[in-house]
Image: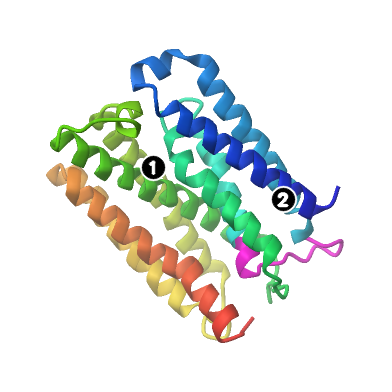
Amino acid sequence: MTTSQFGIIAITAYLAASAALVHSLQTDYIALKSSSWQRLRILVLGWLAALLHGASLTDLCDRAGTVNFSFLSVSSLAALSIVVILLLAALTKPVDKLGVIIFPLSAAIIFMKLAVPEEAHTLKVHSWQMDIHILVSMLAYSFLNMAALQALLLALQDWHLRSHHAKGLIRSLPPLQTMEKLLFQLIGAGFVLLSLSLLSGLLFVHNLFAQHLVHKTVLSIFAWLVFGILLLGRTCQGWRGQIAIRWTLGGFVSLMLGYFGSKMVLEWILNRH
């Protein structure tokens, strides 16, 4: 099978997993927790989609070991990283509801990669140090992306509980305290990885101006400061609720602009490699 065929089947599997998740929203959290079959079906469909997604990305690296880092290729790889982390975390944490957003979004990114032709963009400097930097950066983005989605769910859950209209998705979510604890666990893991990403970038990446990486670096440092202040506020001042949600979303927007916004502008608008 070709990578395009794997991509098409992966889209179908993601949509099937999304449909199973939407169906599970009819069940409240306690009943869903005891329904092992329903959760198992979602996880199996999710893993199937992830494996097919991975197979659709085998053309990113050619026989010479050159990796294509074009915008949609990197976006698809990031989406796969987020899905895998979600599925692994779902084995022990109540994060599976994030798939309602992550699965359809991953399917949409695969579709765009198949539908929109792109020129291959390769790294100007390739080494094992750069491989480590890219891997850690991808993991940091994945964890903090999940934290941002968790913050959105937390905001929605908080609003519904305050207005006494807990239905559907809200009834299927864990208690508010559990959701908030999970949010800060995701932020903590993402912050550590983002710190390692910035440190490895400082050590291994040279000629930031020549590689058009200044915008990414500045925005990533700003995001690091935002998440660092949030974690400090949580520890020292007990920040939670709306404060935590706003700071999480603000930090992620800065990180997303740094990781993908500047790359999209450079490749799609300025046509620079």
Region of the chain picked out in magenta, as a range: 61-74
- Residue at x-position 68% and y-position 72%: 123
49 or 85, nearer to the observer? 49
Q: Secondary structure at mark 2?
A: helix
Position in image of residue 143 (x %, y %): 45, 47
Q: Quadrant of the C terminus?
A: bottom right
The residue labelled by disc 1 is 186
The amino acid beneath tag 2 is Gly
Neighbour tally class for label 1: few under 14, some 14-19, many 20 plus, Cα within 10 Å: some
**Quick check: 62 left or right of 145?**
right
Which of the pair 69/103 is nearer the observer?
Answer: 103
Residue 68 among those drawn in magenta: yes
Between the residue at mark 2 and the residue at mark 1, the CA separation in whole angstroms equals 29 Å
Identify the residue at image location x=43%, y=46%: 146
- Residue type, numbered disc 1: Leu
Which quadrant holds residue 45? top right
Left or right for 205, reference 257:
right
Examine the rendering and report whether any part of residue 248 can be seen.
yes
Observer-side mark, 2 or 1, equals: 2
Closer to the N terminus: mark 2 or mark 1?
Answer: 2
Are dots 2 and 1 in contact, CB under 8 Å? no
Of residue 202 and residue 176, the one placed in the foreground of this image is 176
Is 185 rendered above or below residue 58? above
- Residue 176 in the image: state x and y as whole percent: 24, 32
State the mark number for residue 219. Answer: none
Dominant secondary structure of the residues highlighted in magenta in the image:
loop
Residue appearing at x 72%, y 44% in the figure? 9
* Point 35% across, 22% down: residue: 29
Can see residue 233? no
User: In the depicted view, which residue is nearer to us: 266 or 34?
Assistant: 34
In the image, residue 228 lies at what x, y percent?
A: 29, 55
Residue labelled with disc 2: 7
